[in-house]
Amino acid sequence: MPNFDGKVAIVTGSSSGIGAATALYLAKNGARVVLHGRDPIKLQSTGSELISQGTPSENFTSVTGDIDHDSTQDALVKSAIEHFGHLDILVNNAGIMQKPGIHVANDVNNFDYLFGVNLRAPYRLAMQALPYLESRKGNIVNVSSIGAVAAFPDNVPYGATKAGLDSVTKALANVGGPKGVRVNGVHPGPTKTDFLLRFGYSETENTEVYDAFAQATLLGRSSTPLEQAKLIAFLASDDASFITGTVIANDGGFLAKASTSL
């Protein structure tokens, strides 16, 4: 089990799914956490889960807002410093697949919106956090996607933003490395969350999509948010002290299986 005693982490998009699981896991292992989400009710639910698992209320705080707003990014860093005095870990998890109200993912307006949320926001937040991370020899974990590697024709913008995030991860590792800051990324495979429900999918459709993706993995199943959170936490921990500039697939063999069809 990783030890995060004395560490402070920002986890964006921590009101549900992988982000919530990551915040809970980090806190369970000693970290103090700044939560983030757009929905205050869902964010409060994550806070309640933290209390239920025994995390003291003084060990976490939260910021509500759209991650593509500069003011939200600034508030996250400010909250970490004001509440806890320093910052050790930034988990750029918040992301979106499709702009609300747009029904065709390849619409150019969706392209513009996704670049703001999935690429500009984590980059700018990383740059805002970097001076504080440098003083603590901290690290950044960017949550990308198998969509950065696998070419999904029905959502070009999403894959493009995640591929861009991988590039940012490697470039920032070069920026931070000389100052002791590690930067890594993860490629989550199919993970059963409410992610698709936010874009108009019904419960039945959500299940059908994840079942189809599950069969495309070598293990024949989807992952749980906790399985993704554990890899993120490992990369953020001192156990990964010599790992930087890499993006690790946690996909049940999805990409390996896809390559056999070539």
Image (cartoon, grey):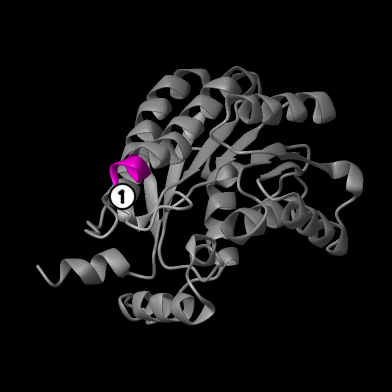
Residue at the location (26% across, 53% down)? 149
Residue at the location (52% across, 62% down)? 195
How many numbered circles does the render carry? 1
Residue 245 visible, this orientation: no
Q: Is residue 189 left or right of residue 150?
A: right
Q: Mark 1 points at which residue?
A: 159
Quick one: quadrant of the N terminus? Answer: bottom right
76 versus 23 height, above or below: above
How far across and down, in percent of the image, does residue 202 sit?
50, 75
228 versus 131 height, above or below: below
The one nearer the camera, 82 or 134, is 82
How far across and down, in percent of the image, does residue 32 sit?
78, 42
Amino acid type of the residue tagged 1 in the rendering: Gly
The one nearer the camera, 55 or 95, is 95
Q: Is residue 116 left or right of residue 107?
A: right
Provide the residue span drawn in magenta. 107-111
> In terms of secondary structure, where does tag 1 sit?
helix
Residue at the location (78% across, 59% down)? 45
Q: In this view, does 189 lie to the left or right of 104?
A: right
How far across and down, in percent of the image, does residue 98 sit?
42, 52
**Which image quadrant for residue 15?**
bottom right
The one nearer the camera, 4 or 208, is 208
